[in-house]
Image (tube, helix red, strand yellow):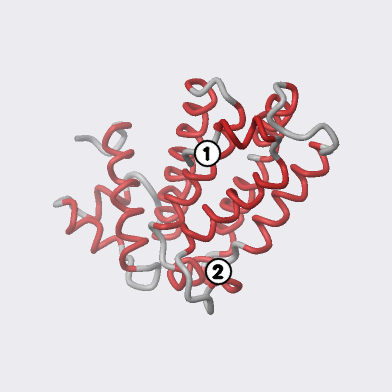
Amino acid sequence: MLPDDQEFQAHLFSRGWELLVTDGVRSFTVENLAADMGISKKTIYQVVPSKEALIANCVQSTLDTIYTNIHKIVENEPNPARQFLQVGEIVAEFTSQVKIRRTLDLKNRYPGIWEQIEDFRFQRLEQFRAMLIAAQEQGYIKDDIDIDQFSFLLMQMINTVFQPEVLIGANYAVGAMIRMFFKTITQGLFTAKGIANVEDF
């Protein structure tokens, strides 16, 4: 495939992400990725100008995949209460792939790339807000919950607590903690009707 072929680039960035989360940014090199894919370094450099640009594209490609999966949930799941927890599951699955030490290295070595992740988190605020408003209108969320305030606090909690330097000393699986986080939130947020509709999560 040619370097400007979209399918090739998608495969390049997908495989690059897999090596990143396996080896970490310190060990991740253009040479290793090229050897893994059976292509030349020159071919990769025809797509991106540097290792940092390659990492940035691998991260962005992964974030785009998460966004696509969230969008599919919104399109295919009519119940907004279940949408909320399904998105939580996507986040849990994604974080389960990544070792905290690897994430901390990425944040420390490439702060500009880490900002992509931070920005992506905050861009999900409106999606969460839309889900929660719909859930409240359908009787799944308590009437006395201010959705704007809750959505803002939710994103702040996620962005503050789920940071590598916070989690690195914890002897818990991050994916499991995120699932517990979302499940605990629903107990105070949802009505009995809402809880009954998500009991299988």
182 or 23, which is in the foreground? 182
Q: Amino acid at mark 2?
A: Pro
Residue at (41, 67) in percent of width and height: 99
Give the residue type that dot 1 points to.
Glu
Which residue position holds label 1? 199
Give the SS element for disc 2: helix
In this view, the residue farthest toward the left is 38
Q: Nearer the viewer, residue 192 or 144?
A: 192
The residue lying furthest to the bottom in this view is 169
The residue at the point 33 percent across, 72 percent down is: 27
Q: Identify the element where label 1 is drawn.
A: loop
178 to 63, vertically: above or below:
below
Q: Position of residue 69 (x, y in %)?
A: 45, 33
How dense is the environment of label 1, judged by Cα within 10 Å: few (below 14), some, or many (20 and up)? few
For the N terminus, give its image quadrant: top left
Q: Is residue 14 above or below residue 160?
A: above
Locate residue 173 relative to residue 118 in the image: left or right. Answer: left
Residue ID at (28%, 32%): 7
Which label sits on residue 164? 2
Q: Residue at x 25, y 58 (%)?
A: 33
Which mark lies nearer to you, 2 or 1?
Answer: 1
